[in-house]
Amino acid sequence: MNLSELRKALARGEDSSQQFKADVKNPESLAGEMVAFSNAAGGRIFIGVSDEGEIVELLPQETRRLNQLIANTATNNVRPPVNPHTENITTPSGVVMIVTIAKGVSPPYADNNGAIWVKNGRTSGVSRLAKNCNGCSRLQVLYMLTKHLLRD
């Protein structure tokens, strides 16, 4: 993605396929976003961008920490693990990291607590489909994902 394409994507705002984060430090929150995108059609997380779509100052040295956090979260906090793709775009205001999560091939996806998350527009980004589906069959969870039925 070049700078012009980035500006166009940011101008569209947040929706069910893209989320903005000024910074990411909490692996549990990041896992919820990854799970929700994997359970839906996939999507992108723009790190270094405010909720209003403004590029904030994300320093180039932060990308190493973020790449490590993203890789660890995708492997250790998402079940089954996912493989995010990251891309760093240098702008006059700082670096924007774009994390692309593909639509999952083995749904349902859950976080370490067994919570299954789905995309719910822009507001909070994700909604919990079920707090703990350890007692759910795979068929029950797949039905909940397609019909957005809540178990809780």
Image: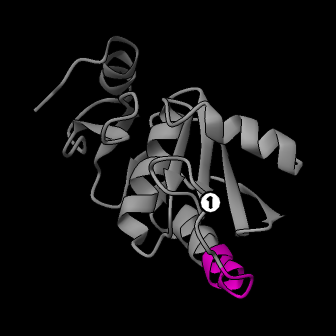
- Can residue 103 be seen here? The reply is no
Give yes or no for residue 67 being in the magenta stretch. yes
* Residue 88 coordinates in the image, percent (x, y): 79, 64
Q: Residue at x 47, y 57 (%)?
A: 78
Number of dots carrying numbers: 1
Q: Residues within 10 Å of mark 1 (few under 14, many from 20)?
A: many
User: Which residue is denoted by mark 1 in the rendering?
Assistant: 55
18 vs 6, nearest the viewer: 6
Q: How is the image coloured?
A: one colour
Position of 66 compared to 92: left or right? left
Amino acid type of disc 1?
A: Ile
Q: Is residue 152 above or below residue 57?
A: above
Instruction: Return the x and y of residue 73 as percentages of the image width and height.
Output: 52, 68
Residue 3, given in percent of the width and then of the height, sits at: 85, 50
Residue plotted at (50% across, 70% down): 23
Looking at the image, is 105 positioned above or below residue 109?
above
Q: Residue at x 54, y 35 (%)?
A: 13
Magenta region:
59-68
Q: Is residue 26 magenta?
A: no
* Residue at the extreme left: 152
Identified at 39% across, 72% down, the residue is: 26
Instruction: Determine whether 47 is above or below 129 in the image.
Output: below
Residue 82 image position (x, y, % from top left): 61, 52
Magenta part, dominant SS: helix
In the displayed structure image, the side of residue 10 where residue 8 appears, left or right? right
Residue most toward the right? 2
Residue found at the very far bottom of the displayed protein:
61
Which picture quadrant has residue 60?
bottom right
101 or 61: which is nearer to us? 61
Tag 1, which secondary structure?
Answer: loop
Q: Tell me the quadrant of the picture where the C terminus can be found.
A: top left
